[in-house]
Amino acid sequence: MGFNSAGFENIFAIDIEDEFLETYRENFKRHHVLREDITKVSNGTIKKLTNNHNIDVIIGGPPCQGFSIAGNIGRKFIDDPRNRLFKEFVRVVSVVKPKYFVMENVARLFTHNKTKTRQEIIDDFNKIGYYVECKVLNSADYGVAQVRKRVIFIGSRVTNEILFPSPVVNKFKSVKEAIDDLPILESSQTSTIPNHKAMNHTEQMLTKMSFIPDGGDRTAIPLSLRPTSGDVRKYIKYSSSKPSVTVTGDMRKIFHYSQNRALTVRELARLQSFPDSFIFKGKSISQQQQVGNAVPPLMAEEIAKSILEMIKREHEFQNDKRA
């Protein structure tokens, strides 16, 4: 959505999850999107899909599950079979040969294995002719009501001058600023706003969360009721005056700062900077996963603007050479 908003034209997109694709098609009706396993899409098909277009940029976020064990004796990050989708991303870049690519991943990859993992990724792109730089960006710097740090790799085959977006806000947007105008809901209630439907909580859960204040955590729950195990990110309430914690695919036990319930898909989407006109399809848990997996559109748009600026500079350089 960020690149779409910045004015880029889609040539083709690909995913394998049916409900994710239902959402994609609902919101990008003019895009050409495939439901396919990328490992089964041949180089010839990729060339046919791009139809000899001079592609400016390929964007994506291939999962890199295997980096957690990168560096173990006898196995490098690049060789881990769980990173096959990263290898597929490299393959598509090598076939299409765009001027640029943008690849997103979790922030801890930046320093993992004493930065060796990061360097392995860069080396893989260097081998196919791309100069690469990467930085950790925080979505809150771009007007997103969420502290979400992600590593962004930008590669180019036409320049060694890589641009990353600078922060655009002086003050982070708070959770309250992002969602407070939405209709008040109780457990299991719905509204006329798309995707704004409250989860159905048990009475036991409602009792537990009723003790937690704005920005508080499980320690506010009486000992006789307090959960003693599980994710420390659960049984907390958003702080209304701060940006959100990182939105993931499962936010069922992080609660609204003033309403006794978890956030709706629409509220989570607001924390990711999606407009209310963006509709999420599929089952509720799938919708949460879609929101949690997304790159915040406002941050993505700023990255897209950096790519546009690099394209502009490259054109000016070529024109100067011809002159």
Image (spheres, grey):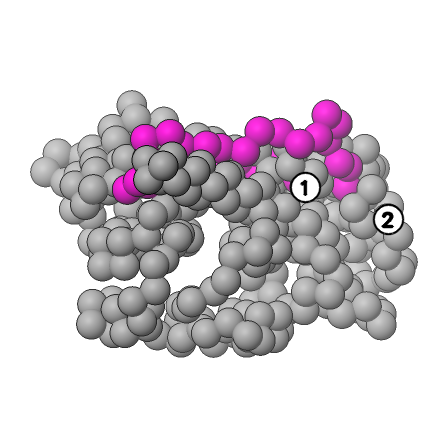
Q: Is residue 68 visible?
A: no
Q: Secondary structure at mark 1?
A: loop
Name the residue at the left extreme: 74
**Residue 180: numbered disc:** 2
Tag 2: amino acid: Asp
The structure residue drawn at horizontal position 72% and vertical position 25%, both measured from the top left corner, is 170
Q: Is residue 319 above or below residue 18?
A: above
Residue 176 image offset from top left, x and y in percent: 82, 42
Q: Nearer the viewer, residue 102 or 272?
A: 102
Graded by Cα atoms within 10 Å as few (under 14), some (14 to 19) or many (20 or more), the crowding at tag 1 reads many
Residue bounds of the magenta highlight: 146-175
Q: Amino acid at mark 1?
A: Val
Q: Is residue 61 visible?
A: yes
Q: Position of residue 75 (x, y in %)?
A: 14, 40
Residue receiving disc 1: 144
Q: Is residue 155 magenta?
A: yes
Residues packed near mark 2 inside 10 Å, few (<14), some (14 to 19) or many (20 plus): some
